[in-house]
Image (spheres, rainbow, N blue to C red):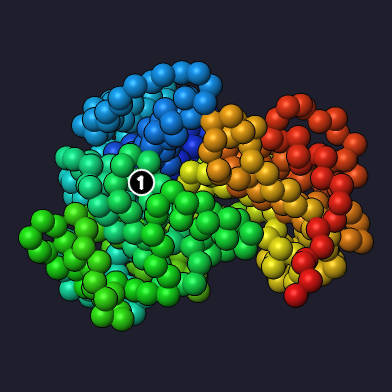
């Protein structure tokens, strides 16, 4: 008789949990997975995938405008928000179905319910009240929306605002919207709404959007957003939201008011750990607010592991997938390996978009920071060389669009190793994904220089930048 109901029970059927469940089942483990909302998690259901579809929709305005310079007479255009949302919903439903099918094909039992930990090897399914046991438990519940201000105090009128969850299901496109926040979600939705025709204001408490990104990318996108008519208010917080005739009014902490049809809070997500029963099993929470884990994703409780955003390491879908795969290979496949975090590429799907991999300029100038956060890069940085290129993309020379592209390479002086690659402009994410391969392998600037350019392309600038950037005299 089996000692437990399952060899592995996964709480959360998002990217990391699904990958771990499928791989473990492939090794012969009996696997169960519980999901309280929809299979696919934040990324597939109400994150990366539907957002990218909306980004595509928002960029057609540029395409229609640019067509005239190439001899096309597009004529009058109209946009229908309900059509976009209906087609987006259809695609998300298709993807969710594929996730379920793939889990079932792997032999994973799906439980459509919230699950909480009852003890070291016990999980309770809330829908039925049944308690099941498992040899290993994997927590992969991702992140939950964080709408409150840093102080934790309730914001008056919070019931009137929407989050990114509701933004995907609005009955109509708002004529004007205030977006509160300055990270990925806020910046991307500001671009989406503006591209579709809304008047957009970003309110952000810091001095510049996209904290943590390279300063040149932050400045460049700020300038491009201003060119597109997006108003950015920095150094301010929203102290309250009130309903008025014709819409809403956001009150800022300096007493000023901004009227709009909608207000969206995009102040990030926090690890989704509330009410999971972690304390019953002795699972500790790390200083970053996520579940404390080691390099093998083990928590402080025996037989309990955690992957993805719930650990608050690097909160990106491919990272969660890699962590889930490493866990399953290591624990059930007896092929131990750990996820590496040194050269993780990422993109902001603004318009223009940002693609980045490696260190920012500020990080590369700080050897102590590198040693603390990227041990494999210890000894690098401090003295660096910068290479920059700023130009109008070829398409804009005929269309007349003033948007400029920016590329930046950060190179360690001692070793010539490329420590950072940052791109602002069309297809930035596609370029950086390929650059990440070379950089993970330790590519030097000389390797970039020795690579034949593909002409004419924007990406060729990455291998043709020869002159070190020198800051202008002040």
Q: Nearer the viewer, residue 401 or 406?
A: 401
- Residue at x 21%, y 58% (from the top left corner): 260
**The N terminus lies in quadrant:** top left
Question: Which residue is label 1 attached to?
Answer: 194
**The C terminus lies in quadrant:** bottom right
Task: Provide residue 168's location: percent of width, then percent of height.
Answer: 28, 42
Task: Provide residue 342's location: percent of width, then percent of height.
Answer: 69, 54
> Height in image: 67 above or below 152?
above
Q: Nearer the viewer, residue 136 or 352?
A: 352
Q: Name the quadrant containing residue 399.
A: top right
Q: Name the quadrant containing residue 436.
A: top right
Q: Is residue 230 left or right of residue 77?
A: right
Q: Nearer the viewer, residue 387 or 230?
A: 230
Task: Provide residue 109's location: percent of width, then percent of height.
Answer: 34, 33
Q: Is residue 263 left or right of residue 325?
A: left
Task: Provide residue 288's location: percent of width, then percent of height.
Answer: 49, 70
Q: Is residue 438 left or right of residue 259?
A: right
Q: Is residue 328 left or right of residue 11?
A: right
Q: Secondary structure at mark 1?
A: helix
- Residue at x 90%, y 44% (from the top left corner): 446
Q: How many other residues sit within 10 Å of disc 1, few (<14), some (14-19) or many (≥20)?
A: many
- Residue at x 48%, y 30% (from the top left corner): 66
- Residue at x 71%, y 71% (from the top left corner): 369
Q: Is residue 406 visible?
A: yes
Q: Is residue 116 visible?
A: no
> Height in image: 204 above or below 429?
below
């Amino acid at each position: 008789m089996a000692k437990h109901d399952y060899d592995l029970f996964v709480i959360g059927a998002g990217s990391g949990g699904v990958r771990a469940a499928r791989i473990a089942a492939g090794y012969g483990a009996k696997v169960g997975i519980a999901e309280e909302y929809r299979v696919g998690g934040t990324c597939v259901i109400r994150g990366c995938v539907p957002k990218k579809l909306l980004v595509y929709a928002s960029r057609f305005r540029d395409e229609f405008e640019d067509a005239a310079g190439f001899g096309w007479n597009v004529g009058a255009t109209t946009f229908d928000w309900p059509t976009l949302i209906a087609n987006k919903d259809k695609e998300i439903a298709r993807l969710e179905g594929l996730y379920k099918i793939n889990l079932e094909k792997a032999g994973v039992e799906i439980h459509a319910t919230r699950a909480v930990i009852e003890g070291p090897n016990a999980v309770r399914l809330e829908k039925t009240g049944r308690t099941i046991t498992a040899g290993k438990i994997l927590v992969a519940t991702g992140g939950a929306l964080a709408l409150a201000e840093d102080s934790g105090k309730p914001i008056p009128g919070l019931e009137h605002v929407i989050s990114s969850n509701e933004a995907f299901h609005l009955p109509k496109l708002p004529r004007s919207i205030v977006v509160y926040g300055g990270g990925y979600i806020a910046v991307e939705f500001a671009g989406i709404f503006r591209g579709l025709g809304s008047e957009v204001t970003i309110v952000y408490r810091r001095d510049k959007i996209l904290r943590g990104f390279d300063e040149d990318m932050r400045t460049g996108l700020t300038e491009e957003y201003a060119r597109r008519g997006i108003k950015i208010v920095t150094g301010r917080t929203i102290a309250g939201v009130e309903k008025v005739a014709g819409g809403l009014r956001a009150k800022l902490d300096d007493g000023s008011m901004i009227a709009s049809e909608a207000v969206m809070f995009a102040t990030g997500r926090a690890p989704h750990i509330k009410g999971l029963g972690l304390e019953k099993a002795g699972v500790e929470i790390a200083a970053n607010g996520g579940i404390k884990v080691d390099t093998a994703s083990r928590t402080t409780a025996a037989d309990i592991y955690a992957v993805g955003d719930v650990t608050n390491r690097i909160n990106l879908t491919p990272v969660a997938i890699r962590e889930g795969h490493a866990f399953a290979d290591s624990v059930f496949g007896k092929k131990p390996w750990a996820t590496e975090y040194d050269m993780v590429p990422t993109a902001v799907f603004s318009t223009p978009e940002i693609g980045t991999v490696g260190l920012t300029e500020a990080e590369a100038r700080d050897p102590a920071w590198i040693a603390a956060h990227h041990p494999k890069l210890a000894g690098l940085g401090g003295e660096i060389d910068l290479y920059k290129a700023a130009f109008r993309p070829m398409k804009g020379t005929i269309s007349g669009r003033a948007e400029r592209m920016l590329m930046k390479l950060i190179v360690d002086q001692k070793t010539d190793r490329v420590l950072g690659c940052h791109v602002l402009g069309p297809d930035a994410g596609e370029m950086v994904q390929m650059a990440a391969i070379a950089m993970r392998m330790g590519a030097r600037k000389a390797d970039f220089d020795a690579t034949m350019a593909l002409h004419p392309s924007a990406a060729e600038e990455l291998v043709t930048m020869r002159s070190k950037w020198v800051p202008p005299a002040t």
